[in-house]
Amino acid sequence: MEQKNLIPYSVYLPERQHKALKKAAKNRKASELIRDAIEMILDGGKPYDSGYNQGIRDAAKVIYNCKEAQMIAVKGRDLGDILTESIEALQRK
């Protein structure tokens, strides 16, 4: 869930894709969009499973980034970590 170890990677895009990506970047979502697409490809399998797994990752990210969930501790672990781990366990292999 942590994105501290991001490594830059360059790709060459057709002009149409580059323009669309720049448009998405105005909302600072270009890199996330590309990471999501790569993750779906690496997931392999059926499109439904890839979409499902992306939904699980998105839900886990919301919980992980929730400051209120990080304020509550259960048995020495913050609730955000516990819920994130539980949600990520729902991913299809």
Image (tube, rainbow, N blue to C red):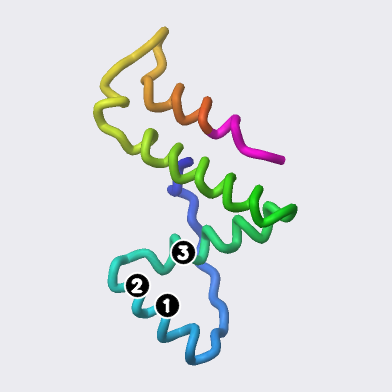
Q: Amino acid at mark 1?
A: Leu
Which of the two residues, 40 or 76, is positioned nearer the viewer here?
40
Q: Position of residue 61 (x, y in %)?
A: 42, 41
Q: Position of residue 66 (x, y in %)?
A: 30, 34
Cβ–Cβ under 8 Å for marks 2 and 1: yes
Q: Secondary structure at mark 3?
A: helix
Considering the whole magenta stretch, tell me its main secondary structure.
Answer: loop
- Please state the extent of the stretch shown in magenta in the rendering: 88-93
Left or right of residue 66, residue 91 in this image? right
- Residue behind mark 2: 25
Q: Residue furthest bottom?
A: 15
Q: Secondary structure at mark 2?
A: helix
Q: Is residue 12 above or below residue 46?
A: below
Q: Amino acid at mark 2?
A: Ala
Which of the two residues, 74 or 8, is positioned nearer the viewer here?
74
How much space separates mark 2 and mark 3, taking CA atoms? 9 Å
Quadrant that contains the C terminus: top right
Which of the two residues, 72 or 45, is positioned nearer the viewer here?
45
- Residue behind mark 3: 33
Q: Residue furthest top?
A: 75
Question: Which labelled disc corresponds to residue 21?
Answer: 1
Question: Which labelled disc corresponds to residue 42?
Answer: none
How much space separates mark 2 and mark 1, taking CA atoms? 6 Å
Whichever of labels 3 and 1 marks the residue nearer the N terminus, that label is 1
